[in-house]
Amino acid sequence: MKKVKVELGKKSYHILIGYPLDDIGRILKKYTTGIKALIITNPRIAEYYLETVDRSLRKLGFQVFVAQVPDGEEYKSLDEASKLYARCVEHRLERESIILGLGGGVIGDLAGYVAATFMRGLPIVQVPTTLLAQVDSSVGGKVAVNLPQGKNLVGSFYQPLLVYIDLAVLNTLPAEEMEAGLAEVIKYGIILDKNFFGYLERNIGRIRGLESQVLEGVVSRCCTLKAMVVEKDEREKGLRSILNFGHTLGHALEALSQYKEYKHGQAVAIGMVGATRIAEKMGLLKRGVGERIEHLIGEAGLPRRIEAELSIEGIIQILSLDKKVRAGKVRFVLPERIGRVVVRDDIPEQIVIDVVRGLMT
Ligand code: NAD
Ligand code: GLY
């Protein structure tokens, strides 16, 4: 069991890692005097874990309500948020009441958004059930819903009361979802921690084999690294943008394929390979480092090439749309060595085109 603190003054909170779901009621009692709890989840996760969480909360005297949202990114929407507000009203939730997001990043972002906005804010407890949500989306306070015009366009920074992680839930996670989460895990090594990257190289098989001791160390290191970044730059005015390593090209691939071809982590994996190659062409990265990065991404079961039927023009066009939003600049996070990145917005377009073309062959 591990406990990581995110130090944000009055908004500080704990991330509890390796805690069993059936103990959540007892632990949560230490963090709240609230009585009512609305669990937001989806049917797939409910089938595995709802009863355990529900029973644990009731045992400690919580009055529990459950709202299920259909499974899928398309339900991270204002429509679903408004149905959830109706449930909050129906159950007469008040300021002390807890909203508990039990699920992956979709549920976490949606539940967090509802918690941030209903009655100007109820406490949100994040109980992430995907690797991606455990190492990334449940930590740091970004909450959001999508609009038809784009992902995460409506949202806020709203820190949770508590993040409660049971690693055993990863046993039911499909392998592809596990791999998608590994892209974010590898990202932390490249941007911030060369020793951690080396550890991942040596232990990737044990991680994919879900060895619990190894997983506990990996998830807690990622949470510690993310906490360090968020503590320094909660609202992404500067440093926090390093967490977007691999995301510039990754987002373009996701958007161009209408979010159907790639899971987020898979697109980020290709984006990390792309950013690494751009860094090499810019003379920022020593020989051999790129090979190590690409090798580990491959060992994690992640794609390193663009195999989907996407056009290079389409990709460049999406990057240029991004550019309009960012005052004429496309921003890339580029590795200088393992454990250190730099944010650059002066990459010649021809280098980007050459790298993307290389990823397609
Ligand atoms: P997801 O929430 O869609 O979950 C993936 C799939 O796994 C779903 O079908 C889900 O029902 C299923 N699932 C979840 N836990 C399971 C378990 N333990 N066993 C079996 N099945 C399980 O996907 P995700 O990758 O967790 O999250 C993606 C979302 O996270 C996106 O909406 C993205 O925008 C958001 N995100 C947010 C942040 C942030 O900082 N807030 C960061 C990264 C990503
Ligand atoms: N997922 C990127 C961030 O939290 O800033």
Image (cartoon, rainbow, N blue to C red):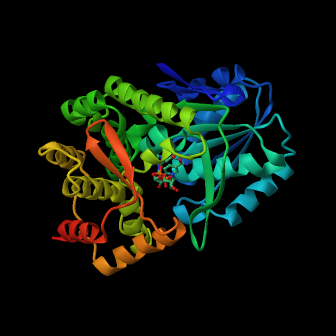
Residue 252 visible at all: yes
* Quarter of the C terminus within the rendering: bottom left
Residue nearest the viewer, comparing 60 with 136: 136
Residue nearest the viewer, comparing 354 with 265: 354
Q: Residue 96 is drawn in which quadrant? A: top right
| Residue appearing at x 47%, y 69% in the figure | 328
Determine whether 183 is above or below 195 in the image: below
The picture places residue 122, in percent across and down from the top left corner, at 77, 41
The picture places residue 215, in percent across and down from the top left corner, at 36, 30
| Residue appearing at x 60%, y 45% in the figure | 235
| Residue appearing at x 35%, y 40% in the figure | 191
The picture places residue 236, in percent across and down from the top left corner, at 56, 46
- Left/right of residue 165 with respect to residue 179 in the rendered view: right
The picture places residue 158, in percent across and down from the top left corner, at 67, 43
Determine whether 72 is above or below 140 in the image: below
| Residue appearing at x 69%, y 29% in the figure | 57
- Left/right of residue 83 with respect to residue 185 in the rendered view: right
Residue nearest the viewer, comparing 163 with 269: 269
- Left/right of residue 216 with respect to residue 336 in the rendered view: right
- Left/right of residue 57 with respect to residue 95 in the rendered view: left
Q: Residue furthest left?
A: 288
Q: Residue 214 is drawn in which quadrant? A: top left
Q: How many marks?
A: 0
Residue 306 visible at all: no
